[in-house]
Image (cartoon, rainbow, N blue to C red):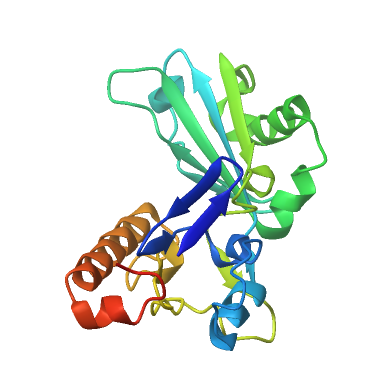
Amino acid sequence: MTVTTGAGSVRAARVIVTVPPPSASHIDFGELLPERRNRVHHNTVMGEVYKAVAVYETPFWRDHADAEIILLGETGFAVFDSSPPDGPGHLTILIGGPDARRVEPLGPTERRDLLLGALAPHLGDDISRPASWHDKLWRHAPFVGGGYASLPTLGTSDGFYPVAHEPVGGIHWAGTETATEHAGYIEGAIESGERAALEVAAALTDPEQRARVPGAR
């Protein structure tokens, strides 16, 4: 088969597609895919996650408070002390779903002031003055479109975990959504990659499987 990209074309006996199903819906597979596989691509959407990391010279809050916090309210979020053992202080902030969409129109400085201001009553006013601030709206990430994994569109069942991943001709499917354990996490992505690699290795050494793939040699 031939894979055509903006950088050129590649001929291959087997292909592994690792992007999330909603992203795969933007790939032109021609007439290769059965209806069930098309439903997986078109009946799923990416989740919505916002992530930020505030960096401080030291994890000063440890002197008087624990920074493992879940704040409930109009913009609810979770906070984790992700500081390295001997390094600077790191606070990781995660917001999901409607709350992530609520902070999306704000600029980085506005988001920082809103979130760290909400933490100040719990961790002290110094929390509002990080040395640096890094944030990410996963919906804006090219080729991803959201985080951390795809979800079934309301009223459908095609995207429940593990997402169907039986090979289609010479096309194999990986990605965290296909994992039997830890779907949505890096562990699930690793599991899926190992499984897809074993599928391809087995197919390349099985003459009967190779014969069923158009153009395979």
Vertical order, 74 against 131 (above or below): below
From the top left corner, tell me how far across and down residue 19 is, in percent.
51, 58
Q: Is residue 171 visible?
A: yes
From the top left corner, tell me how far across and down residue 149 is, in percent.
53, 61
- Horizontally, residue 3 falls left or right of residue 217, namely right
Q: Is residue 175 visible?
A: no
Question: On the rendered image, what quadrant is the C terminus found in?
Answer: bottom left
- Horizontally, residue 135 falls left or right of residue 100, namely left
From the top left corner, tell me how far across and down residue 144 is, in percent.
59, 51
Residue pictured at 32% horizontal, 69% vertical: 181
Of 135 and 126, the residue lying toward us: 135
Of 130 and 67, the residue lying toward us: 130
- Horizontally, residue 56 falls left or right of residue 73, namely left
Residue pictured at 23% horizontal, 83% vertical: 208
Of 71 and 19, the residue lying toward us: 19
Residue pictured at 28% horizontal, 75% vertical: 210
Quarter of the view holding residue 24:
bottom right
Residue pictured at 74% horizontal, 24% vertical: 109
Question: On the rendered image, what quadrant is the N terminus found in?
Answer: bottom left
Quarter of the view holding residue 47:
bottom right
From the top left corner, tell me how far across and down residue 129 is, in percent.
62, 16
Of 201 and 206, the residue lying toward us: 206
Residue at far left of view? 205
Residue at far right of view? 105
